[in-house]
Amino acid sequence: MVRILFLHPDLGIGGAERLVVDAALALKARGHEVSFLTNHHDPTHCFKETSDGTLQVQVVGDWLPRKIFGRFYALCAYLRMMYAALYASFVLSHRENIDVFFCDQISVGVPILKLAKRRPKIIFYCHFPDQLLSIREGYLKSVYRAPLNYLEEFTVGMADVTLVNSKFTLRVFGDTFQRLDVVPDVLYPSLNTQYFDAMQKKIAAMPSMEFGVKACEEIPRNAFIFLDINRYERKKNHALALHSFRLLIDALSAPDSKRCRLIIAGGYDDRVVENVEHYNELRQIVSKLELQENVILLRSPNDDEKFMLLHKAHCLLYTPDNEHFGIVPLEGMYMSKPIIALNSGGPTETIVNNSTGFLCEQQPSKFADAMLQLYKDDALRERMGVMGHKRVQQKFSFEAFTDKLNNIVETVIKPVWTKESSKKKDA
C-alpha cells in the first residue's frame, strides 16, 4: 500500500477537480491510502466524494488572501500553495509516512515538498501551463508575470514524474517550457463510470423521473434540448452557443422553434468576480437575442442534477477554443449524446468528426448547421450516440485510467521500496 497525498489549490467543481478526485478514487480502489490537502473546500460547492467522507480532505491556508486590491490573483494562488506545501512537508510528513505527493495546476510547491521527511516522490499533473491561462494586459502585466512564469518552468522540472492531459497539451508544454529536458507522459482523464451506470439503473427503474432541477420543471415533455456544460468563464465561450442557437431558431418553423431549448449549466462561485460578471453578461445576451423563453442559465448543478441534464438532453454543445482536454464531451458520449465542439485542442482527440459528433469552426453558422442536422435526423443522432458510448468504453475507460495511473505510482515508488528492503536485509 502506498500513502498518497493530493495537493490541489481549490477543491471545487471543474474539470481539474474532477480529474484529481477520479485519480484519488482510482488509487484508493487499488488499495492505496489517499487524502487531499487544499487551500479551499466548500462542502456545498464540490464533488460529492469530497464531502460525504469517501475522500478525506484537509484545508490549510484559506485565511491567506485570494487577491490584493482586486488584482494579483496568480501571486496569491502561488503563496497559498506554497503555504500548503510547507504544511505538507513539515507537519503532515512528520505525522504520517507519505510516499507520494500528487500535485496539479500550481507547481511552485514542488521544491518545498522535496524537503519533506523520507523524501516522498512527487508527481505533477499539468492540465495546461499556468502562464498561458492569464490574460495579457500590457507591459506591466508582463513584468508582473515574468518571475511567476520563470518559477513555473523551474519548479515543473523538479517533479519526479510529469503528466499532461492530452497530446495537445503535450505539444503546448514543449513549446512553452523550452528550457526543460522533460517529456511528460499523457494520462487522459476518464470517467468514474460506476456512478453513471448506477444512475442509469435508477432511471430504468423509474422511467418517469423528472429533471430534479427546479429551473427546468416547466420545460415541455416534447422539448428538444441542447445542453452546454462549462464554468461561467469568458474563455468557455458560452456566447457561441447562444448566437448559434439564435440562428437555429430562425431556421425552424414556429412550432419547432417553440420546442427547442438551450440549457447552459455552469460552475459558479460568487467569490469569483468573473463568474458573477460573465453570468450577467450571458443574461444580457439572452435578452438581446430575445431567447428568454428558450434558454435556461443554471448555476452549479450538483452531480445528480448534472446527470439528469445529460440524460434528458438530445445533444451536447462544447464551445471552448483550444481546450486542454475537456471531460464534458466524454460524459456526453458515455451518455450516448452526439457532441458538437470546436475543431481545436483536446476535443479533436476525443470526438471523431461525423462519427461521434461534429467538429466545427468557431462560427455560429457552422454550429447552427450541425445543430439543425441533428435536430432533423433522429437516426443520425442515435447512431452518433451509440458510437460515442463505444468510443469512451474503448479509449477512455476508467479501468484503463486506473491501470496506467497505478502503474505510474508503483514505478515511481519502486526505487524507494527497493532501497528500504535492502536496508532491512542488511540489518
Image (tube, rainbow, N blue to C red):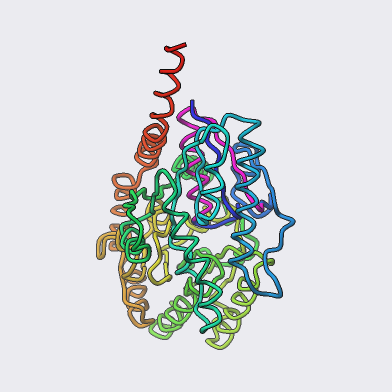
Q: Is residue 222 visible?
A: no
Q: Is residue 133 above or below residue 96?
A: below
Q: Residue furthest front?
A: 426
Q: Indicate left or right for 424 with 351 as reference.
A: right
Q: Is residue 277 above or below residue 80?
A: below
Q: Is residue 17 above or below residue 417?
A: below
Which region is colored magenta? 16-40
The quadrant in which residue 326 appears is bottom left
The quadrant in which residue 317 appears is bottom left
Q: Residue furthest left?
A: 354
User: Residue 394: where, in percent of width, then height?
Assistant: 29, 45
User: Residue 95: where, in percent of width, then height?
Assistant: 66, 31
Residue visible at 44% across and 78% down in the picture: 240
User: Residue 309: where, in percent of width, then height?
Assistant: 52, 58
Instruction: Judge whether residue 38 is colored magenta.
Output: yes
Residue visible at 36% across and 73% down in the picture: 371
